[in-house]
Structure formats: structure tokens, C-alpha cells
């Protein structure tokens, strides 16, 4: 459900970035008088219809004309020639009147009439032989083949224009570009080349026959030519000319020309409903994928990535706030015509504040995985998406490093300054790479610097809102809670002074241990200050607050005593929630005893009831520590309490006591659910021993005042018997004290 909420907030951010940030473009009809100056609110391309038509006409003109050559027409021409030859009359072998010589002149005249070509008697006499007839047809073939191979066209007029042409074979569909040397011959030109003049004998008759049967075998394919011209026109992309952002389209008081009206209509169409829907769907898809993919990668592969439900709400809300802020800033910058142009003003958007906020509230791993998609998506809806993304990314990373675990508000402003410097450097780099004018580079860098400074201030506000609404406990909040003037700590000091002092020393130990292992020292320290605030309800029932000689537990059953001791955990959590200490501190208060055994009352009950005691009745409800800081507070609490029972405070005894407490806690399984390693425990034990040795240091023996004398046993009070404590009672053994502490 929280993932869906995150994606829903990302979708809202996408919708916000898709909103138009410029005012509506006024439309004027040609001839109207413009009532205001109209400038282009963004770069857009306008189709140049005249130039487009000219280029398409040129492309159509360059498309080749297609001519088809029919290879079957040669065979038809040869068949016709053979038929004509067969029509040549031959002399009869036997005449009715007896043998009579052929009238070759009459036969020649008849052949000429049939063939339509002049035929001599000698040629007719020669064709009486079948072999001569075959030879004549062979001559006709040799005359026609070159002509049909090159091509013969009925009308050579189209070939007079200089344009590309191709010759396509209808049988093989192969195309051959036509050159001036390979152009088809006109029919008249081809026939002139077959003129029989100058030839004699069979060659003369063959030429006459070839000229007779010659026909065009090449024709222009108008349909195919038109189709190719249409394709050539369609391949030409529309010619557009660029209208730059800020360019004047029409001035106030001018009469609007048709071209200006066309520009206004094109500008207004940029935000039409259809484009807005398509653009919105695309932006929603990009934002959801851009956030979901890094989120899932971090959740599955990065150990310290924060993905709790409220963390997802924080990420989604941050995206939405920054998207809305960016869109509002772009609208304001467009309306006000800011110096440097809208492209430079975009760099002043404090988009890096999102990365700074996540770094301060969550951790660096989560901030790093957010920085890239936030920068890219933040620049997506701007006039300079690539430059904006680079500037936002640089500012976010540098600022996140600067804010770190900032415990002072000034650290956020300092981080914003460094983020601005980084953004200005990147903006200048983009300007130099694009060979921009020096003045434009200066404006870009100045706006980017301002955006970084604004990001530092905005992140401070976002962190406060995260603390207030989602209950995060940042280092800023921890610094406020660390003040000893906090109402809870003042109340603890007045009503439970022993617990108050114990909490301060525990905080010192926890801080030293946290610094030794690289944990959040401030969180461990502050949580230690408040870990026992639940004792305020019954301070006298805890040994550090009991007056001398009074112990209410002496009159109570062990089970009831254990219930009183364990109740301080629940009551402490309720107090923490009431005073809005934050969820991290609430969790540590609930876990600072884990499920540890209250050994003193367990053993006391066992002595009274023998084997009828259940150990679970004398354990804290838990849960066990879930974080390193909670484990540190548990160990520091136990070690500080145990240190007060040591009669011998030499460093070696302190070191042994600390190691014993750490080992016993580890063996009891109280540290199984937190990330403390054996190396961490070794370092923690060393830090605890060092602090306790400093607290319980040795002092020199000061000279006695004149009116007091030291007894032989070293007691300065002559009225106190030797070997007794200040209450006059024999001191308890250290083991007995540890049991009373539940250790």
C-alpha cells in the first residue's frame, strides 16, 4: 500500500510538471490590431509550407521516369518478317501449256505489292532457294536485335528534357539507368538507320523487310512514374523554421499579418488537449518508472536503504513539493521576463533540497539513489532538460555531503552554499561547452548559485516538516532534546536525582561506544538521557532513588516488584510519545532492556517458591534491540549500574566487570536482532572501560582540617563505627548489589 502511495505521489508530481507554466496565447485573425505584445513563451518550430512544397517538387523532379521495354516484340517482328517472306510468289514448276520460263519481272511486281517494299526480279530469283530465304531472315534478325536491345520509342520528345530515367525490362524487372549514350532511338531515327539506299542484293531486301516490321518496344510507364514521384515527395520532411523563446511574434498596435496569425495559431497548438494528454501520460510513466526502479533496486540490494512506509511517504511528498515549486517558479519567471532568460532561471529551482532533506532525515544511501532520478525528472519539464539535470545532480550530491548529520541550522545554509558553488560550476561548464556568450554563462552560473542557496534554506523547512508530521528525529531535533532544560529532564532531576545522574553517565558511555563503532552518537546519547524517564511515576521503587534504609520492595512480593520494574519501560514510551521525542527514541526506550531477566527478584521468588517460578514472568517484555544505538544504550545502562557496586575501582577490575556484562548480555541473546558485531562489542567494551576509569579516578589524600582527626581505620567521622557505610550499616557484597539491579 505504501508503495502505491509513493507511486501515486510521483504521478501527481508528474501531472504538476506537465502543467503549462505560461499564460494563454492570444489569437488574432489576419487584419486585426494586436492589443498586446505577444512573445514566444518557449522554443517551437513552425512549418514553412512554401519551402516544403519547393523541396517536394524538387524531389519529385529528381524521381526517375520509368520506361518499360518489351523483349517479346523482337520475336513478333521476326515472325512478321517470316510471314512476309512466305508471301513472296515462286514460279510454278509445270505450266498447262508446257514448260515455260518464269516471268521474273511479274513475280517481282507481285512480291513488291504483297510486301509493300520494292523487290527486284533478281531478288525474287534468289529467294527460290529455301536456304536463301532463311539467310534473308537471319539478316533481318541481325538488323533488328541491336535496335530492340537499345530500345525503340514511338515519341522521342520526353527524352529531350534533362531528367533521370530508368529502363525496366518487363520480363526480368531489371532496371537500367539511361544515359545520353544509351537513350532509346525514336522510331523514325531507327527506320532511317535501316534505309536500303546504298545496299545491294539480299542486304537491300533485308533492310527493307526490317524497316517494314520495325516497331517501338519501349513505352513510358506513366502510372509507375507518378507513383515514384509521390513517394519521393512523401519522403521529404516538412521544412520548419525555429521560433526562439522570447522572440516577438506580434507587437501591440500592429495589424496582424497572415503569417503572424499562422505563428500565433501554431504557438497556441502547443498546449492543445490532445498533446497535453499524451504528454501527461508520458510524464506519469517516466516519473513512476524513474522512482520505482531505483527504489526497488535499493530495497533489494542496498543494506542501509530506508523503505519503511513513512520513508516512502517522505520520498513521495518531497517529489510532489519540489515539482509544484518548480512549476510555480517557471510560471513566475515566464511572466516576469527574468534576466538571463527562462533557460537560466530554471537553474534557480532549489531541486537539490530534496536530496539534502533525505540525507538529513534518512541516510546517504537513500539520498544517493534519489539524487539521479530526481535530477533527471526535475529537468525533464524545463526548456533545458540536460543542463538542468546536470546542475541539480551536482548540487544535490555536494549539498548532501555538506549537510551530513548536521546538528546546527547553520550547517544547512553552509551546505546550500557549497551546493550553489557546485551548481554554478556545472552551469558554467555547460555554457562553455555550448559556446554560449559570456553574459549568458554568467547569468546561468548566478541563477544556479542562487538555486543552491535556496535549496539549503528549503531543506531546513522540509526537515522541520518531516519531524513535525512524520515523527522523524533528526540531529537537529536531537540537539534540542539534548538540552538539560527539557521539561522531562528537569522533572527527572528534581523527582529522581539518582536516575538523572545515572542517565547522564549512561549517555556519556553510549556516546563513547557509538563513536568507537561509527554509530549515531548523538542519538545514542540523547536516548540514554531519556531511557529511564518511565521511573518518574514511581521513583522510590528504584534503588538509585531510595532514601537510606528504605526499600519498598521489602514489603512486596517478588512478582509485584518485577511488574513495577518492568512498567517503567511502558510508561517511558508513553511519556516519550506525549512529549514528541520521536519514534527512534521511543523505540530505544522500549528496547533498552530487551527481554532481560530481573535476576534479583527471580532468585528471591525461587527461594520462596522453590521450583514454581516461571522465568518468563521475570523478564522485560522487549523487544530486543533492533538497532546498534539501542544495543549500545542497553549495554551502557547495565555497565553504569554495575559499576556502582564495585568495591574495588582499579582499572583492571573495571575492565573485567565491563567485559563480564558484555559477555553475559551477548550470551543471553539480547543482541541477536541488532547489527552489532563481535568487533563492535570489543571496541564498545574498551570505550566503556576507558570512560569508567576516568570517572572513578584516584585522588590524592588531602590534609585534614585542624579540628578533625583521622582514626586509625581512616574514618574522619569519630561517631561512625569502623566498617560501616554512611547509614551505619555494613556494606552489601557486590554480588548482592548486582542481583538487586537485575544483573
Image (tube, grey):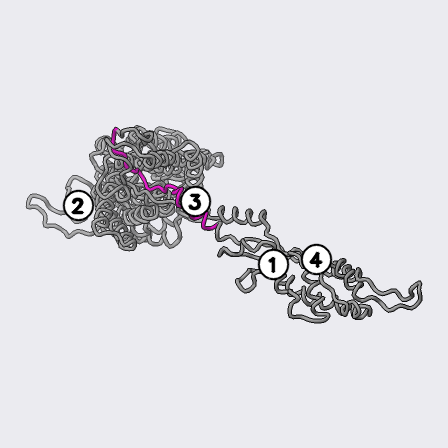
Alpha carbon separation for disc pair 2 and 4: 140 Å
In the image, the segment drawn in magenta is: 35-59
**Upstream in the sequence, badge 1 or badge 2?**
1
How dense is the environment of label 4, judged by Cα within 10 Å: few (below 14), some, or many (20 and up)? few
Query: x, y (%) of residue 65?
Result: 54, 53
Tell me: 393 left or right of 96.
left
Q: Which residue is mark 2?
A: 715
Residue 437 is situated, as x and y percent measured from the top left of the image, at: 23, 51
Which residue position is annotated with label 4?
Answer: 72
Using the image, tell me which numbered label, if any, was put on residue 188.
1
Q: Label 1: how many residues lie within 10 Å, few (<14), some (14-19) or many (20+)?
A: some
Rounded to the nearest angstrom, the CA distance separating label 3 from label 4 is 41 Å
Q: Earlier in the sequence, mark 3 or mark 2?
A: 3
Q: Secondary structure at mark 4?
A: helix
**Circle nearer the N terminus (3, 4):** 3
Judged from the image, the secondary structure of the residue bearing numbered disc 1 is: helix
What is the CA distance from the residue labelled 3 to the residue labelled 2? Answer: 116 Å
CB-based contact (under 8 Å), mark 1 and mark 2: no
Residue 232: x %, y % from top left: 50, 49
Amino acid at each position: 500500500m505504501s508503495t502505491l502511495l509513493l507511486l501515486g505521489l510521483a504521478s501527481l508530481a508528474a501531472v504538476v510538471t506537465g502543467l503549462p507554466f505560461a499564460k494563454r496565447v492570444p489569437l488574432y485573425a489576419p487584419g486585426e490590431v494586436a492589443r498586446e505584445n505577444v512573445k514566444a513563451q518557449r522554443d517551437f518550430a513552425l512549418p514553412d509550407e512554401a519551402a516544403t512544397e519547393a523541396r517536394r517538387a524538387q524531389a519529385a523532379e529528381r524521381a526517375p521516369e520509368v520506361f518499360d521495354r518489351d523483349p517479346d516484340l523482337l520475336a513478333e517482328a521476326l515472325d512478321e518478317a517470316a510471314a512476309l517472306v512466305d508471301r513472296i510468289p515462286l514460279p510454278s514448276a509445270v505450266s498447262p501449256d508446257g514448260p515455260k520460263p518464269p516471268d521474273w519481272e511479274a513475280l517481282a511486281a507481285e512480291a513488291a505489292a504483297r510486301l509493300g517494299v520494292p523487290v527486284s526480279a533478281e531478288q525474287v530469283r534468289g529467294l527460290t532457294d529455301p536456304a536463301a530465304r532463311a539467310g534473308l531472315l537471319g539478316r533481318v534478325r541481325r538488323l533488328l536485335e541491336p535496335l530492340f536491345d537499345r530500345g525503340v520509342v514511338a515519341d522521342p520528345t520526353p527524352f529531350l528534357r534533362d531528367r533521370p530515367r530508368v529502363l525496366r525490362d518487363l520480363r526480368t524487372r531489371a532496371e537500367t539507368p539511361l544515359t545520353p549514350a544509351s537513350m532509346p532511338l525514336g522510331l523514325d531515327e531507327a527506320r532511317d538507320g535501316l534505309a536500303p539506299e546504298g545496299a545491294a542484293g539480299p542486304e537491300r531486301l533485308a533492310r527493307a523487310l526490317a524497316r517494314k516490321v520495325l516497331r517501338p518496344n519501349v513505352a513510358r510507364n506513366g502510372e509507375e512514374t507518378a507513383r515514384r514521384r509521390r513517394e519521393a515527395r512523401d519522403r521529404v520532411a516538412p521544412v520548419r523554421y525555429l521560433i526562439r523563446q522570447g522572440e516577438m511574434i506580434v507587437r501591440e498596435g500592429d495589424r496582424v499579418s497572415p503569417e503572424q496569425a499562422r505563428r500565433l495559431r501554431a504557438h497556441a497548438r502547443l498546449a492543445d488537449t490532445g498533446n497535453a494528454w499524451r504528454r501527461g501520460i508520458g510524464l506519469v510513466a517516466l516519473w513512476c518508472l524513474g522512482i520505482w526502479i531505483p527504489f526497488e533496486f535499493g530495497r533489494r540490494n542496498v543494506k542501509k536503504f530506508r523503505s519503511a512506509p513513512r520513508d516512502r511517504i517522505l520520498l513521495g511528498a518531497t517529489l510532489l513539493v519540489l515539482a509544484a515549486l518548480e512549476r510555480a517558479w517557471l510560471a513566475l519567471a515566464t511572466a516576469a521576463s527574468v534576466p538571463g532568460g527562462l533557460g537560466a532561471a530554471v537553474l534557480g529551482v532549489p531541486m537539490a533540497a530534496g536530496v539534502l532533506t533525505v540525507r538529513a532525515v534518512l541516510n546517504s544511501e537513500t539520498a544517493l539513489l534519489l539524487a539521479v532520478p530526481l535530477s533527471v525528472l526535475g529537468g525533464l519539464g524545463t526548456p533545458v532538460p540536460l543542463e538542468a539535470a546536470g546542475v541539480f545532480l551536482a548540487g544535490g550530491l555536494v549539498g548532501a555531503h555538506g549537510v551530513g548529520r548536521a546538528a546546527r541550522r547553520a550547517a544547512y545554509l553552509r551546505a546550500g552554499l557549497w551546493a550553489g558553488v557546485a551548481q554554478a560550476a556545472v552551469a558554467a561548464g555547460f555554457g562553455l561547452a555550448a559556446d554560449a556568450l559570456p553574459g549568458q554563462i554568467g547569468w546561468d552560473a548566478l541563477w544556479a548559485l542562487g538555486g543552491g542557496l535556496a535549496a539549503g534554506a528549503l531543506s531546513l523547512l522540509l526537515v522541520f516538516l518531516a519531524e513535525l508530521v512524520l515523527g522523524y528525529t533528526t540531529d537537529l531535533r536531537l540537539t534540542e532534546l539534548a538540552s538539560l532544560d527539557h521539561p522531562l529532564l528537569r522533572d527527572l532531576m528534581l523527582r529522581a536525582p539518582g536516575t538523572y545522574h545515572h542517565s547522564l553517565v549512561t549517555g556519556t558511555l553510549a556516546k563513547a561506544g557509538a563513536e568507537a563503532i561509527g554509530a549515531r552518537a548523538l542519538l545514542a546519547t540523547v536516548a540514554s538521557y531519556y531511557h529511564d524517564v518511565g521511573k518518574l511515576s514511581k521513583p522510590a521503587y528504584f534503588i538509585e532513588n531510595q532514601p537510606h534504609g528504605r526499600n519498598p520492595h521489602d514489603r512486596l512480593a517478588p512478582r509485584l516488584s518485577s511488574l513495577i520494574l518492568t512498567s517503567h519501560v511502558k510508561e517511558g514510551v508513553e511519556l516519550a510519545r506525549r512529549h514528541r521525542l520521536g519514534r527512534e527514541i521511543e523505540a530505544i526506550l522500549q528496547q533498552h532492556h530487551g527481554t532481560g531477566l530481573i535476576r534479583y527478584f527471580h532468585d528471591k521468588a525461587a527461594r520462596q517458591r522453590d521450583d514454581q517460578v516461571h522465568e518468563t514472568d521475570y523478564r522485560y517484555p522487549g523487544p530486543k534491540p533492533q538497532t546498534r544505538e539501542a544495543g549500545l544504550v542497553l549495554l551502557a545502562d547495565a555497565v553504569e549500574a554495575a559499576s556502582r557496586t564495585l568495591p574495588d575501582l582499579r582499572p583492571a577490575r573495571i575492565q573485567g566487570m565491563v567485559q563480564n556484562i558484555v559477555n553475559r548480555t551477548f550470551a543471553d541473546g539480547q543482541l541477536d536482532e541488532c547489527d552489532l558485531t563481535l568487533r563492535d562489542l570489543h571496541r564498545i567494551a574498551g570505550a566503556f572501560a576507558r570512560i569508567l576509569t576516568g570517572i572513578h579516578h584516584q585522588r590524592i589524600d588531602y590534609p585534614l582540617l585542624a579540628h578533625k582527626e583521622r582514626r586509625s581505620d581512616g574514618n574522619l567521622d569519630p561517631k561512625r563505627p569502623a566498617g560501616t557505610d554512611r547509614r551505619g550499616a555494613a556494606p552489601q557484597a557486590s554480588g548482592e548489589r548486582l542481583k538487586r539491579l537485575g544483573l
